[in-house]
Image: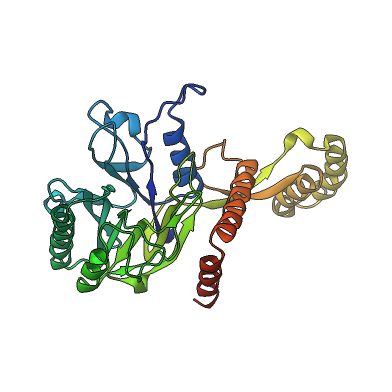
Amino acid sequence: MSKHVNICHINARSLMVYDKETHSFSKFEEIVSRLVLDMKYDIICISETWLGGSIPDGDITISNYTQYRKDRNRHGGGVMIYVSDSLPSVRKPELEKQDIENIWIEVSINGKKVLLSTYYRPPIHGQRAAGVDYFINSFQTSVTEAIMRNPDCLLIFGDFNDRCVIWNDQHPTSELRSQLVDITNVLNLFQLVSEPTRYTDNSAHLLDLIFTDSPGIIDQVEVLPPLADLDHCIVSCRLEFSHQTGNVYNRQVWDYGHADYIGLNEDLATNLNVVLDQDIDTCVNLFYTVVNDAAARFIPNKIAKIRPKDKPYITHACCVADRIRDRCHKRFQRTRNPLHYEIFKKKRRFA
């Protein structure tokens, strides 16, 4: 079946943290459960992976996804992208610049070429002007080279640590000041996230960004509640190119454990005798209908949507708990920054 391509970014702040209580890497498992099995993102971009050579690819494999990673070390940094195997993809290392934490890949979607990147720019308070200039120049060079390849869509996700509340202000508290805004305007890029993505007790900043050169084919840009113990929200969007994915289908399921077999037998004894008194052609035509109708009356049943990739532990209770968490997060946003929240609601309502 055909569906849109859903993409997200998350700042993981160490993807492989060992939980001594559960004896597992619970953060990685929650990311897989939430983003892959529940929300079913086709492309997952991750910054601050905190991965190093001691973590092999096999330890962070997600079934039916291709992984691309660029590590710093086990103490910080690092970026990564997971792409669904239903989307042909290839890494483009020639677009990646030395000493800049980013990954570039090319994704093919129904014959359309999408160049996608994930960035992480670490915060360095009081960073020297030369360091800022190096990042801005490297970003401009990579994006310019990507644009020259004439993709059908260019998408850049990441945590840029450009501390601001509103994207189009002067960024007075950012190490980059207005340089990132200025260079993206020069490159004709649009920044799509319009609300803070990291909350603390004393602040709310827009750090996790989505840039594109094709805003007309990007919709459903959302800032979703954080996972695990993270303080960065998930940012996501939907790309309107469609692609082929695994079939989702409806199936009638039966609860045989709670069936009324006495009533079923009595019903079939009566109605099948009537059917069997007919000629052979009529018997054949009516037999399935009589049996199926009787089963539907005496065996509890329902029509269920079957998703082949769903796991049995993603139950209705899990989905309800996720919705409760999302509502709590929205209430928190409203009380933490009421003016910005009201502006955001109006934009969503009239968009």
**What residue is drawn where x is 16% and y is 56%?**
129
Residue drawn 40% across and 67% down?
166
Of the 4 image quadrants, the one containing the N terminus is bottom left
- The image's colouring method is rainbow
Give the left or right position of residue 63, taking residue 106 as reference: right
- Image-quadrant location for residue 95: bottom left
Q: Residue at x 25, y 60 (%)?
A: 176
- Determine the image quadrant of residue 267: top right
Please tell me which residue lies in front, 163 or 46: 163
Farthest front residue in view:
126
Place residue 70 in its image quadrant: top left
| Residue 44 vertical placement versus 212 (above, below) | above
Taking the spot 27% from the left edge, 28% from the top edge, the residue there is 56
Question: x and y percent of residue 320 in the render?
Answer: 64, 47
Residue 125, image x and y in percent?
27, 49
Regarding residue 12, the answer to whether it shows in the image is yes
Locate residue 167 relative to residue 334 in the image: left or right.
left
| Residue 84 in view in this figure | no
Q: Position of residue 143 (x, y in %)?
A: 18, 62
Image position of 134 (left or right of 219): left
> With 258 as the anchor, is 193 left or right in this view?
left
